[in-house]
Image (tube, rainbow, N blue to C red):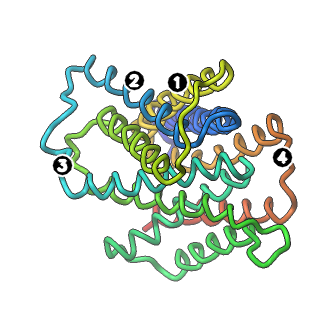
Amino acid sequence: MIEPAAAIRANLTGALWMTAAMAGFAVEDAFLKRAALSLPIAQLLVMFGAGGAALFAMLALSRGERLVTPYIFTRAMGVRVGFELTGRLFYTLAIALTPLSSATAILQATPIVVVLGAVVVFGERVGWRRWAAIFAGLLGVLVILRPAGESFSPLSLLAVIGMLGFAGRDLASRAAPLTLSSRILGVYGFATIVLAGLIYAAWEGRGFVWPDRAAALAILGAVGIGVFGYNALMQAMRTGDVSVVTPFRYTRLLFGLALGMALFGERPDTPMLIGCAIVVASGLFLLIRGRRA
């Protein structure tokens, strides 16, 4: 049966929105890495989080939404905030202290860990094929990290912890109250980044500095493109079939690798590319099998 033209257009539009979102997030990472060259990481988190929270708050208020409701204080939201804090803090550290390409590559394992978490936390049933894909994806992460190789850096584990935080956030989002809009979730998601920055500032013990022009522009760029990416992601998930649109998340890897090479002189080696291919193939297989199930 031929798919109606309207459905084809919706899937194409959703795929374009998802690709735009992933490009936005990759550019956001590049802006943050640039700002981290001259700003303390704690200050970077505070400024970025405050800017994003303020922008989302204005968007929410323009729609007549209340910023504070009883639904914010649910257990699910508390768990989500905890994972968001972990993911944002450690992934930002990874961006600042490790190559952008490797941090982006490790982040692509998030959907695989989400499926694993759904089995453990929500009791979802997974057949042997999807179990094999989960373990293959985790093996791909090990290929990227190369823990037994001479080139291994313990700092690479920052991206792993960040990825686990984001996976936990995505799982917790499934239990978050449906009455909270994406804009309200954006407000508190970015507010959590401010909290992460303040916690890291207390641990780091460094004072804040006045940002130079380049750093200030990078922060503004990260905030603007980050909010765009978040909204584009929400638009993508509401346009077309989720099973068609979701695989385009992996375009973020292409953008991340390209920006790392073009802006920061990074050169991904063969093992990293092989690990990326394993992770992406495993994630796509899980999406396909999940749709059939």
Q: Are marks 2 and 1 in contact (CB under 8 Å)?
A: yes
Q: Position of residue 29 (x, y in %)?
A: 63, 39
Residue 55 badge: 2
Residue 131 badge: none
Q: Is residue 102 left or right of residue 49?
A: right
Q: Work out how far the residue at label 3 is from the one at label 4, CA to CA, in angstroms.
A: 43 Å
Mark 3: few/some/many CA within 10 Å (<14, 14-19, 20+) = few
Chain-order first, disc 2 or disc 1: 2
Q: Residue under label 4, please give it.
A: 266
Q: Is residue 227 left or right of residue 120?
A: right
Please say whether residue 12 is visible from this viewpoint.
Answer: no
Q: Residue at x 78, y 79 (%)?
A: 148
Q: Work out how far the residue at label 1 is from the one at label 4, CA to CA, in angstroms.
A: 25 Å
Chain-order first, disc 3 or disc 4: 3
Q: Work out how far the residue at label 2 is from the one at label 1, CA to CA, in angstroms.
A: 8 Å
Q: Quadrant of residue 215?
A: top right
Secondary structure at numbered mark 2: helix
Q: Residue under label 1, please give it.
A: 224
Q: Work out how far the residue at label 3 is from the one at label 1, CA to CA, in angstroms.
A: 28 Å
Chain-order first, disc 1 or disc 4: 1
Chain-order first, disc 4 or disc 2: 2
